[in-house]
Amino acid sequence: MNNKFLKGFFSEIESIPQVLQNSYLPSLDGLRGVAIIMVVLSHLVNTSRFYYDTVFNGHLGVLVFFVLSGFLITTLCIKEKVITKDISLKNFYIRRVLRIFPVAYLFILVVIILNYFFKLGISYINFIGTALYLINFTSYFRKYYHTYFTGHFWSLSVEEQFYLMMPIILKKNFRLYLWVVLIIVFVIPGFICLQYYFTSLNYIVFYVITHYLIKFHAIAVGCLFSVLTFKYSFHKSFVSRNKVIFNILAIFLMLYLGYTDFFSLRDVLTGVACSFLIGYILVSNIADAKDFIFRFLNSKYLKIVGTLSYSIYIWQEIFTSNDDRLPAFMVKFPSNIICIIIVSCLSYYFYERFFLKLKSKFSRVKNNKKLVVAS
């Protein structure tokens, strides 16, 4: 039985299940909306410690983005491979550039201008590290060149570094891709646990490798849940019948664990647990349902927030900085919230959408009628 399961798990995916046929999964926008609300409210200086640490946990919000990203990117790549028998790396990276770079570099340009006029003291080395998506190397940038204004680019750096490698592996060898995902998801956290108890394992090279790869963990969990969704019907039977109570339990457990993204053994273990809980909530809500959780994730206004989530994530860092060198209306509550809404909407509707329309031209999977449906 185990050998049969493993053989099926590592076999190439040749069909697309009904639940993943649609090119747009609306619940994902709802989850993005929840995640960005958590991040923004955690950054507001008037947020109480209880709500910051427990309910509006920005670290947990970023973790949701990571799991979502891994799930969605892997799903799109596998769909393309099933339908076209290949993955166009050229098109993948063009789509990625058009999605991430335009608003990111516009933001950097705006911060450079603000830095000049308001004497924010941000080093040019920080701008270079941010522009090259290297800001996640915190031991260097945090110590010498850290600034709040570009600090959120650490998560974008982690994602871009992950996607420099993984689509190439998925294109070449699906089995190898799964092994890499499984190593990141299960082996790396286990090795870090051993490093905390056996200091002899903390050689510089081993320490750097494990503590670098652990940042990919939540994205890899999303990748794993994508593969599992292709291969197994999570939206049926047991998961479907017990979905609401399990979702509620998962939410309360994540809030209780109080995840942060710092390098401690507890953070590693809570990150592992929360990533799997987020993955479960994700896959249990992609199929149409009538329960209140699905309806909440698919509510009109939450989906709008989710659609704007990347714009909000990029621009909110200026307006939540509480830097008194900037005009008060930009950084003081509640006017800063109004600024976030206005700037994010302007950015998305009058700038980003141009690149998103251009991005769609590089998709090889456009017609749902071509999808291969799993039996």
Image (cartoon, rainbow, N blue to C red):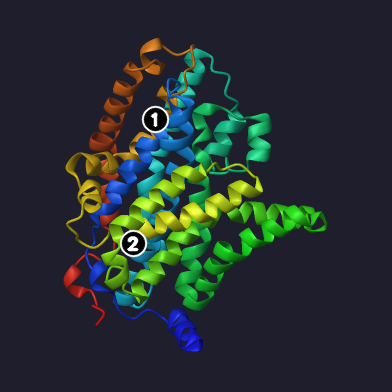
Tell me what residue is drawn at x 20 percent, y 39 percent. Answer: 301
Q: CA distance from mark 1 to mark 2?
A: 26 Å
Residue 262: mark in rendering: none
The 10 Å Cα crowd at callout 2, few under 14, some 14 to 19, many 20 or more, is: many
Dividing the picture into quarters, in which one does residue 179 lie? bottom right
- Residue 248 percent location from the top left of the image: 34, 51
Whether pointer 1 and pointer 2 mark residues with C-beta atoms closer than 8 Å, the reply is no
Q: Would you place residue 94 above or below residue 11 in this image?
A: above
| Residue 124 in the image, given as x and y percentages of width and height | 59, 28
Mark 2 falls on what kind of element? helix
Instruction: Decide which of 223, 4 is in the foreground and name it.
Output: 4
Disc 1 residue crowd, few under 14, some 14–19, many 20+, Cα 10 Å: many
Outermost residue toward the right in this view: 200
The amino acid type of the residue labelled 1 equals: Leu
Tell me the residue at 41%/81% (across/down): 12
Residue at (23, 74) in percent of width and height: 371
Q: Which residue is mark 1?
A: 41
Tell me if residue 93 can be seen: no
The image shows residue 268, relative to residue 185, as above or below, that is above
| Residue tagged 2 | 283
Mark 1 or 2, nearer chain start: 1
